[in-house]
Amino acid sequence: MTILQTRRHFLASAASAAALGGLSTLLPALIPGAVRPAWAAAPLRLAVERRVLEVMGKPASVFGIRQPDGTSGLFLDPGQRFLVDLANRAGEDAVIHWHGMTPPYAQDGVADVNRPLIRDGASQGYDFEPRPGTHWMHSHHGLQEQRLMAAPLIVRTTEDRREDAQEVTVLLHDFTFKDPAEVLAGLTGGTMDHGGMDHGGMNHGGGHGGGHGGAMPMMNHSMDMKGMGDMKGMGGMTMAAMDLNDVEYDAYLANDRTFDDPEVVRVERGGRVRLRLINGATSTAFHIELGALDGTVVAADGNPVQPVTGRRFGMVMGQRLDILVRLPDEGGAFPVLAQREGERQRTGIILATPGATVNKVAGLADGAAGPVDLSLERRLTALAPLAPRPTDAAFTIRLTGGMAPYVWTIDDRPFGEHRPLTVLKGQRVTVTMVNESPMAHPMHLHGQHFQVAALNGTALAGAVRDTVLVPMNGSATIAFDADNPGRWPLHCHNLLHMATGMMTELVCEQTI
């Protein structure tokens, strides 16, 4: 991987006032193509592009987010500012969310009335202090994320630099040769206008998502599901495992490759490796299997945790894990596997020492994996937990909806009919999410990182995260200090669930 280094400074850009409904402050909007002084160092350059990827011997047209030298995503050094020009060469409008970052509202990478999409052929500048850790970037518009509009976003710390460990970043995906709109239409009965849908909604009447006036398109609640049972393998539901997985995918990728042709990473005998694992899948949770290697989880969603050792770790969509492993002195080849929950399919990479024989790894495990559960979450403890203080604002929301009809909601309301959670800057906030639906949901909050404060009603001082699993018939409570004014999406990171309505907003208002 290539690391670009540059001197940092602020962009010289004009600021315009954009009134935000429900906020008692005015937040600045970025100006595309802002003019910089001649003395200003150049920002890092990223481009959203189309590319052809070969999957199982077949070409597929997908997206990429790359630097000029072809590097996927960004790898920032300690102290390096997030100073980026993003060019949209995708052939369609797009917007990129910096998942794990907590930038000012205007730079979060979600389109709404105050934050337009990046039009095809245009560029957008960003300038903020990045949050250290393993993060990623992905589209927050339509179903582009399913077509691999995603990439790593790694921000190293001084401690990372001092650590005697080789870094290996792995971005996991689920992949379909089908048009994602066709996949979703198979689930919904074709009742959604996918071309106008703003992934994440966040339209508020701004019209950036197409002809829906800002509201999430409604499903036909009278839709019956007869005939859906024959859709397995056709981009539809897997009826035999519908409580775990919505879609039967064609392949599962690790750094764009399957186990037909896996990435082989050369490592040292007896050396240490820091695995930066990112679950960028649209609709798939994975079990990480280290085989003969012992691993130590040292960070979750980019935030340091008390070390937790093991060989098997669950990851749901949107989550990241940093795992340290040590290679044996005698060397060898060591697959790092990601097996789909409820299924036999798997992907991954292979760590191999010099001269080691690398044998072919089957893309199917001997048996199906169980569901990803809360066993790891219960063991995680933040190294930098929230300071004790009383709660100022407490909310309880219900995760609702189901497979038939295929509609996923919060408090029985799809996005566009949602009731925002409104808080004041500086308040200690808790949100309890109670899952009354027939599937688990990885819930992601923009703009704030939270501490996991309770699981299924049992209090704990858990990890600091931005994405937490709420299991079927279970609950999770998160706590945070609201310190970032704006309208922040709180949504399921199963793209198909969010697309059909499972999202609300946390509105953090500036105190007067």
Image (spheres, helix red, strand yellow):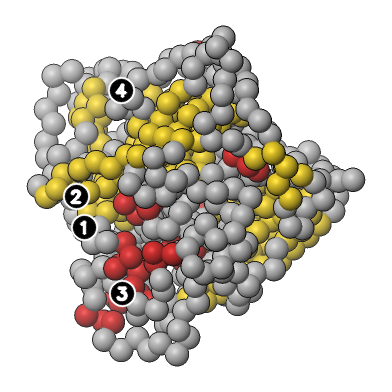
Inspect the image, locate mark 1, and give the three-letter code of the amino acid beneath it: Phe
Q: CA distance from mark 3 to mark 1?
A: 14 Å
Label 3 vs label 4, nearer the camera:
4
The residue identified by callout 4 is: 69
Q: Earlier in the sequence, mark 3 or mark 4?
A: 4
Q: CA distance from mark 3 to mark 4?
A: 39 Å
Inspect the image, locate mark 2, and give the three-letter code of the amino acid beneath it: Ala
Local secondary structure at mark 2: strand
Inspect the image, locate mark 4, and give the three-letter code of the amino acid beneath it: Asp
Q: Residue at x 38, y 89 (%)?
A: 224
Q: Earlier in the sequence, mark 2 or mark 3?
A: 2
Q: Earlier in the sequence, mark 3 or mark 1?
A: 1
Callouts 2 and 4 close, C-beta under 8 Å: no
Quadrant (top left/top right/bottom left/bottom right) for the N terminus: top left
Displayed quadrant of residue 404 = bottom left
Tag on residue 177? 1
Q: CA distance from mark 4 to mark 1?
A: 27 Å
Q: CA distance from mark 2 to mark 1?
A: 7 Å
Q: Residue at x 31, y 74 (%)?
A: 186
Regarding residue 198, the answer to whether it shows in the image is yes
The residue identified by callout 3 is: 186
Label 4 vs label 1, nearer the camera:
4
The residue identified by callout 2 is: 60
Q: Name the foreground residue: 82 vs 77.
A: 82
Q: Name the foreground residue: 417 vs 430.
A: 417
Callouts 2 and 1 close, C-beta under 8 Å: yes
User: Looking at the image, how many numbered discs can be counted on the residues?
Assistant: 4
